[in-house]
Image: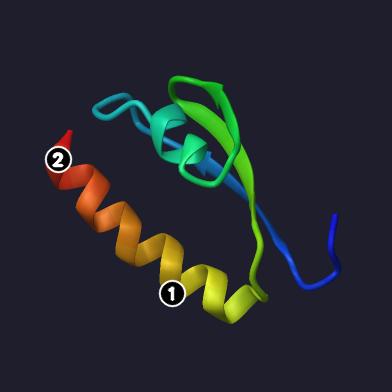
């Protein structure tokens, strides 16, 4: 993994499957527990994940 990349773990309470969101970053996993690597430093990764997650949540 690139040292400037950020590893993320995603969990869902069961209302929205999260593995499709993880695939956005080339990751995957189980429907309600998934992970991925965001190819950005932590602060930029947080901004991007939160922004995209809001959109993903309201579309699903």
Say if 37 sits above or below 49 in the image. Answer: above
Q: Which residue is mark 1?
A: 47
Q: How is the image coloured?
A: rainbow
Q: Please, which residue is most extreme toward the top here?
A: 30
Q: Position of residue 27 (x, y in %)?
A: 60, 36
Whole-number angstrom distance, CA of label 1 to CA of label 2: 19 Å
Residue at 78%, 73% (x, y): give it: 4
| Residue hosting label 2 | 59
First in residue order: circle 1 vs circle 2: 1
Give the left or right position of residue 6, taking residue 24 as reference: right
Residue 57 place in picture, x, y as percent: 22, 44
The crowd level at tag 1 (other Cα within 10 Å; few <14, some 14-19, many 20+) is few
How busy is the neighbourhood of tag 2: few (under 14 within 10 Å), some, or many (20 plus)?
A: few
Residue 16 percent location from the top left of the image: 27, 30
Task: Name the quadrant containing residue 58.
Answer: top left
Q: Is residue 1 left or right of residue 44?
A: right
Could you say which is closer to the camera, residue 59 or residue 32? 59
In the image, residue 30 sits, relative to residue 21, either above or below, namely above
Rendering quarter of residue 42: bottom right
Residue 23 drawn at (x, y percent):
50, 35
Determine whether 46 is above or below 57 in the image. Answer: below
In the drawing, does residue 22 fall left or right of residue 9?
left
User: Residues at badges 1 and 2 in contact (C-beta under 8 Å)?
Assistant: no
Q: Residue 4 vs residue 12: left or right?
A: right
Q: Secondary structure at mark 2?
A: helix
């Amino acid at each position: 993994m690139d040292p400037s990349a950020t590893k993320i773990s995603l969990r869902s309470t069961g209302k929205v499957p999260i593995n499709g969101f993880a695939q956005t970053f080339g990751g995957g996993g189980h429907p309600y527990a998934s992970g991925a690597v965001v190819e950005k430093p932590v602060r930029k990764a947080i901004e991007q994940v939160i922004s995209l997650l809001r959109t993903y949540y309201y579309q699903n």
